[in-house]
Every structure is written in structure tokens, then in C-alpha cells.
Amino acid sequence: MCLSSVVMSAAVDASSAQSVEEARVDLAFQSNDPYQILFLIGVGEMQKGNYPSAVKIFRSLFQSARTRRIQLELARALFLDRQFKEARKLFLEIYEDPEVPLSVRENIKLYLDEADAALGQLKFSFAIVSDSNPAGFTDARKITIGGQTLYLVPPDENETVIGAKYGLDATKALTDDASVTAYLNTTFTDYQGGDFDRLDADGGFVFAPRGLPKFRAKIGMEQALFGGSHLYEYPYATLIFIPKPFNQFRWRYELEYGHLNVSHVNNLEADKLTQVLNAKRRFARDNRLASNVFLEAAETEEDPYSYVGGGLGGELSVPINDHWGVKFLGSFSLREFDGVDPLFGSARKDDSYTVGLSFFSRLIKLFGREPEVGIRYERRNSNLEFFEFDRVKLVFRLTER
């Protein structure tokens, strides 16, 4: 199909657009550049959800002008139209181009991860990790219970440990259009001695109906083992709302209900409700911010262990050069428990924060994987000293693209 006929066809399709889109198309036709006109019409079609039309437009453009910008929009249109295999191929070509800014590659990585999940994947990661307080032992060295003072001595084995952390992420589409996907994410941390070894697993199903592009749902189960013993299980259901599928990574709202069952500690069994708002923005050209705000509530049979809370967090990615970037992360949260703790005689109130720094690369590969090295400090404060602790974690990670 010739360029002029595609422009005419797209202009007719765009005639039913909302006022904002109509304004963009009218503005475009004032230009003398037919490629610019067609490009803007293609973007308008994506914004309206007319993905097959957008694919048609950008494919014609790409055949005439093979630029990275047009290739990126063609890949996005294919992705939104659930043509994941071709979209992934185009995204990956851009991602591996050393001339592409790091911030753009970071954005493309989000699409690649979801395309991989839809097509089916089996990805491994490996890390060397260090933890200064693997047991999460309290800072307090004496506490008062029932009017009596008790002195606390940290266990001998609760010293800084170094270990290996192995990760496996697996997904499999169960329908041709990836409207139903199964997933399993696991990590195993192997410390010397075995006292603090930990296994975490999270598996379930994602439902993404093609006719409801703004909604997704998940049902799954988390399990954890620590030091060879079962720690907890957490079955959950999550509803995800994406206000604008066209920019689906910019804003996401999640509502999750789950039931926490802590092994051998019946009074911590809880029904939990969590609301999370996730946002990602690019600013100051090449910097990128991912942030979240959350509210939570947990209901147990005994008031002292029920709580409400909330918090916020963020991760700022800043390019150092074409090969390396730095991430700054931080989070802060509060929890307020409902009743008086029977041991300590007061209602518990906690605040926690995390700060961290890491360096990463998307182009340099070690053993075929992307490297990242970082440090993180975690701190929990409480009006009940027994629940206060801190730790420092170091990590060197290799992640498969």
C-alpha cells in the first residue's frame, strides 16, 4: 500500500476520535511532512485502543523510514495488540543498541519482561549476598516484662554472613493470546552453616482479558522456609487497574486480599487487605523514577496483633554513561497495632525505613548476564524496644535478560 493511501485511510479512521485526538490530527495535517502526519495519526490510534490500525500505520512507516523512534512505536503497537513475538524482537534490537540512552533501555525492559512472561520464559539469576543481622535480632539488650527485667544476649550464630542467592522466574501462557498465564518465582539463599538459609516461592495465575485491557487479576500462593523450617504461607487474590493501557507502566492500582498463616504461631494468622498505587515517570531527560504508595490492614483474632499501616517508596535511576547507571532507593512505612500487647503492656507502634544504592549495566554482560552491585540499610523503630532492629545487606547480582 502506498504512503498516500495509508494516510488517507488513517485519516478516515481518526475522524471518530475524541476532541483531543481530533485536535492532534488537525494540527498534524498543517505540517508538510507526510511522515510526521502519519506518525501522529498512529500515536492517536494507539491512544484510542485501535491497535491493529496503529500496527498497520507504523509498519508502513518503518518500511519507508527505519528509524529507532518509529521502530519503538511499532513495537509498542504490536505489544498492545498482543503480537508479543514480533514486538519482543523489535524491542530487543533497540535494547541492545549501544547508541540508545540508558533511560530508554530501562523503559523497554518493562515491555520485554511482560512480553517474555506472555511468550513463556525460564530465567535464572545469581547473587553473592551479605547480611549483618540474618536473624533480625533486636537491638535491645534488656527488656521489661511483667515488671521483671530480662537481659537479651544475641545468639552466637547471628553474625554477618555471606552466601549465594539463586533465583528462577518461570512463566507459561495457557491461551494463544496470553489472556491466562501461569507463573512461578522462586529464590533460595544459601548461607554458610545453614541456620539462615531461606527459600521463597510465589506461584499462581494472571488473567488479562483482551476485552478488558484496563483490568488484570491474579490468584496465587506465597510460601517461605527459613532455617529448614516452614515459615509462612500466604494465598492471595489481586485486582489490577491500568487507567491508560497506552502508557500502562505509568500508573497502576492494585487491590489485594490475602490470608497469612504463620507456622506454629496461631495468633499471627491474619486476613490482610493491601492497596498500592504504582507510578513510573521519566524526567530531566534521562532520569527515571519508579514510586509507590500503599495502605494496609491486617485483622487477627487477637487485637494486639491486628494493625493498620501505610507507606511510600521510590527508586531513582540515573545514567552515569552509556553503559552504567546508578539507582537510589528509599522507603518509609508506619504500622499501628490495635490493642495492648499482653507482654509489654502497651500498644505497639512501628516505623521502618530503607535506603540503598546500587550500580547496574544493561550493555555489559558477565557470563551472559547483566551485573548489579549494591548496598542497602534497613531499620525498624518501635515504641517497644524488643521489636527494634537494623541490618546492612550487600549484594552482587547477575540477572539474565
Image (cartoon, rainbow, N blue to C red):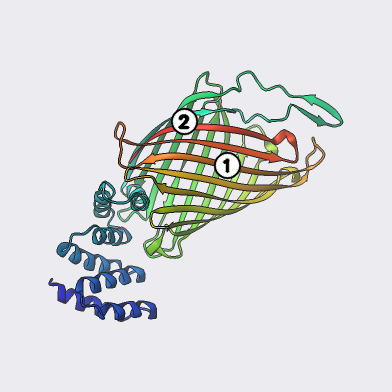
**Residue 267 position by quadrant:** top right
Q: Please state which of residues 389 and 55 is positioned toward the viewer in this rendering.
A: 389
Disc 2 packing (10 Å; few <14; some 14–19; many ≥20): some
Q: Report the disc number at residue 354.
A: 1
Q: Secondary structure at mark 1?
A: strand
Give the quarter of the figure containing the C terminus.
Answer: top left
In this rendering, the answer to whether 48 lies above or below 92 is: below
Report the residue at 20% width, 75% height from top: 7
Q: Of the residues under marks 1 and 2, which one precedes in the sequence?
A: 2
Q: Which image quarter: residue 266?
A: top right
In the picture, measured across the screen, residue 319 lies left or right of residue 149, that is left
The circle on residue 398 is: none
Q: Relative to 42, does residue 31 appear above or below in the rendering?
A: below
Residue 66: x and y in percent read 18, 59
At which x and y percent is residue 376?
53, 37
Q: Which amino acid type is marked by label 2?
A: Phe
The N terminus sits in image quarter: bottom left
Position of residue 28 measured from the top left corner of the image (x, y, whole percent): 28, 77
Q: Is residue 333 left or right of residue 194?
A: right
Q: Is residue 12 above or below residue 182?
A: below
**Res. 142 image quadrant:** top right
In the rendered image, which residue does mark 2 sit on? 188
Identified at 39% across, 40% down, the residue is 360
Residue at x 47% of width, y 29% of height: 129
How much space separates mark 1 and mark 2, taking CA atoms? 22 Å
